[in-house]
Amino acid sequence: MKGLEIFEVSRYIVFGPNAVERVGLVLEKLGYLGANVGVLSGKGETAAIADRVISSLDRGDRVSIKIGELARDGVEAVARELAGTSVIIAVGGGRVIDYGKVFAHLLNKPLIVVPTSASHDGIASPYIAYTLQASLGIDKISTAPIAIIADTGVIGSAPPRLLRAGIGDVLAKAVSVKDWELAYRLKGEPYSEYAAKLASSSFEIVSRHIRSLHQPSDEGRVRVLVKALISCGVAMSIAGTSRPCSGSEHLITHFIELHIDGRKALHGELVALSTVLVAYFHGMRWRRILRMVELAGLPRTFRDIGVDRDLAIDAIINAHKLRPDRYTILGEGISRKAAEQALEVTELI
């Protein structure tokens, strides 16, 4: 018999053009109208979106903080600035939203996210990127946003490369669920069929629209992608783990991310190519997934995004060491010969 399960999911999700103007309405519904608000954003274009959010609010004090990369002492300094607020609003891409989760977790405050791009599946997830968790050296973060304000106009105007990266992150669900099922069968790891189905459904929906999904001019397509990414986050909340959306393809990606400049290769781009590799290891129809990568306009090889042959091979061989508690198709390790063969057969390098 399973024990007690507690799901932490968003209470309000607002989609559509000019959704950023509805932040005040959401605050009112949540009982925070007029409360002191802390607004996080990046230092670039997302700062202008954050200004729109702030200008749409009335009453209460506003603490606006524009952040870049933060070390542990930087996190502590920002946390002190946010300590007097009642609710945190994170306006930006994956990194800003992740920092929002960090501060909401440390200060035990509710979090509202306003994504400015659809490049990742962490919008609704309680968890943050592995690389950020590792760099900060803090305990596991588990804070789902209480509300999500997804302005399709803002997201659609983001660089098309970011939309394509979001598609890449959803494609991973074709293999992450397989890894989770494998761990359940071989290691007796806890498994949620409902969460697995929800993640798989996001992949299936995106695969059906793959030819046109990355067109930023189509508001309806942007909405489909954002909903798929949010559904992935909900799947993780239900599972109580990132397992349904993060398997060996993410381990390979994380290994590479620890060794390259993140500005050259986006997370979703690396995930998409790693998904093809893992589909090959699982004996799946990897060529079908590779075709989706091509149709989405994603990079076709690791070399296209600055990952050389040696690093790709090292990632395949050593990725399983990053999270030894998480069993995947990589098992106790892939041999160099098998790694080289996988890259050659799939022509990913």
Image (cartoon, rainbow, N blue to C red):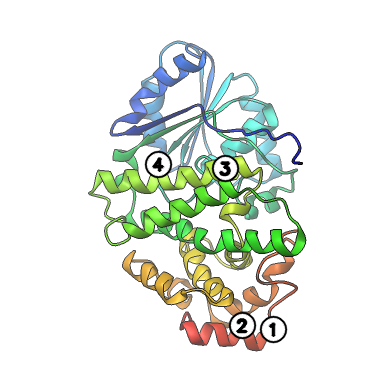
Label 4 near label 3: C-beta < 8 Å? no
Find residue 266 and name its label. Answer: none
Distance in Å between CA atoms under marks 2 and 3 = 32 Å
- Residue bearing mark 4: 116
Residue 187 at what x, y percent from top left? 76, 61
Distance in Å between CA atoms under marks 2 and 1 = 6 Å
Q: Nearer the viewer, mark 2 or mark 3?
A: 2
Q: Nearer the viewer, mark 1 or mark 4?
A: 1
Q: Is residue 136 above or below residue 316?
A: above
- Residue bearing mark 1: 335
Q: Amino acid at mark 4?
A: Thr
Mark 1 vs 4, N-terminal side: 4
- Residue bearing mark 2: 339
- Residue bearing mark 3: 98
Q: Amino acid at mark 1?
A: Ser
Residue 17 at what x, y percent from top left? 28, 34
Residue 66 at what x, y percent from top left? 50, 36
Distance in Å between CA atoms under marks 1 and 4 = 41 Å
Question: What SS does tag 3 mark?
Answer: helix
